[in-house]
Image (cartoon, rainbow, N blue to C red):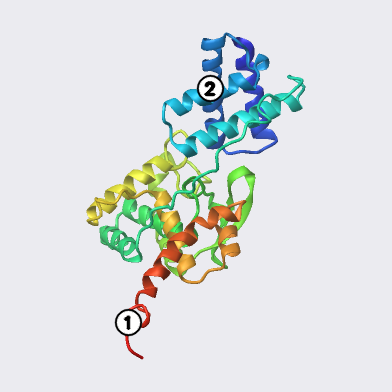
Amino acid sequence: MRADDNILLLFDEMLLSEKQLSHNTRRAYKTDINAYMNFIHVKYNLSVLNVDSTIISSWFRSLSNNAIARNSYLRKVSSIKEFYSFLYSDGLITSNPAKEIEAPKKIHNIPKVLTIRQIQKIIETIQPENNPNSIRLLALIEIMYSTGMRVEELVSLSLNSINYENQSIFVKGKGGRERIVPFGKHALKAIINYMNVREYFIKNKNNSSFMFPSVGKKGYLTARRFSQLLKESSIKAGLSYFSISPHILRHSFATHMLSGGADLRVLQEILGHADISTVQIYTHIVEDRKKIALAFHPLENNINL
């Protein structure tokens, strides 16, 4: 149904212009709505404009039957509710059939984290190589572990986003939200070393505004490539048993900061989370470590005082 395809294009334009969502978030929304459209087109031969809540619910039941992950299911519910809210607000439908549909409570999985020693092992594996590729990789790791930036925020950094004088980075994050994050002395050293070899990654003497330029389509190193390089280094460091990704570096930063006594609200701002409940996921890890520490209490060990 061609009309539904056009509606999806309008929805995507709204997500970009009004919600200012990132490319990845918009792509997820469109994937969900496409799957939903295919379902109702095939099973009911209906347009998205002519369904009721029972038909929408039937799609969700089909998802449950396929045993998809709970948080993936939750995202699809969110996509449908956002989609029909848009249709209703734009006057394309007279009532919102998804309004009363409720999503199950989201389960926040406790993220995996590296220990400080594991991160040091990765860094110690990269440092001796001292070639342009290893110097760039070290800069990426040091910046991410020092700031907790999202991987896409990191690889797409512009040259003028870094303030060397006060050791901070201007970051444009999810939904166009802007923030300034500080970085430490190890990251500063890694950045300075990298800037000495940055031209190696600029082909044909072209100018690039990106901190980590690349000849690829985007013009900068992709998150996927950074992830591959990080995994290769973790294997060399003897951590092949641990599935390491840039996202785990971000989790590790947050957990280690909280363990060190960082304020939860300040950490929320640094990470760029709109909701503090997202940051509170990391407190579970810290609390578990506190419980382990309690085992050393004299009363817990029946030590006579």
Give the image location of residue 189, x and y in percent: 42, 66
The answer to which image quadrant residue 169 occupies is bottom right
**Label 1 neighbourhood size at 10 Å, few (<14), some (14-19), many (20+)?**
few
Estimate the spatial distance between the alpha carbons at disc 2 and disc 1, rounded to whole Å: 58 Å
Is 196 positioned to the left or the right of 280 in the image? left
Q: Which residue is mark 1?
A: 302
**Label 2 neighbourhood size at 10 Å, few (<14), some (14-19), many (20+)?**
some
Q: Which residue is mark 2?
A: 59
Say what secondary structure mark 1 lies in: loop
Foreground label between 2 and 1: 1
Which of pointers 2 and 1 lies earlier in the amino acid sequence?
A: 2
Give the image location of residue 91, x and y in percent: 77, 22
State whether residue 280 appears in this view.
yes
Question: For this rendering, which residue is in front, 281 or 60?
Answer: 60
The answer to which image quadrant residue 130 occupies is bottom left
Q: Is residue 160 above or below residue 45?
A: below
Give the image location of residue 37, x and y in percent: 56, 18
Q: Residue furthest bottom?
A: 305
Question: For this rendering, which residue is in front, 200 or 123?
Answer: 123
Question: For this rendering, which residue is in front, 167 or 4?
Answer: 4
Residue at image point 32% right, 64% down: 120
Give the image location of residue 119, x and y in percent: 34, 61
Q: Is residue 301 above or below residue 69?
A: below
> Where does the N terminus fall, quadrant-wise?
top right
Is 135 positioned to the left or the right of 55 in the image? left
Res. 179 mark:
none
**Residue type, label 1:** Asn
State whether residue 254 appears in this view.
no
Q: Is residue 169 above or below residue 97?
A: below
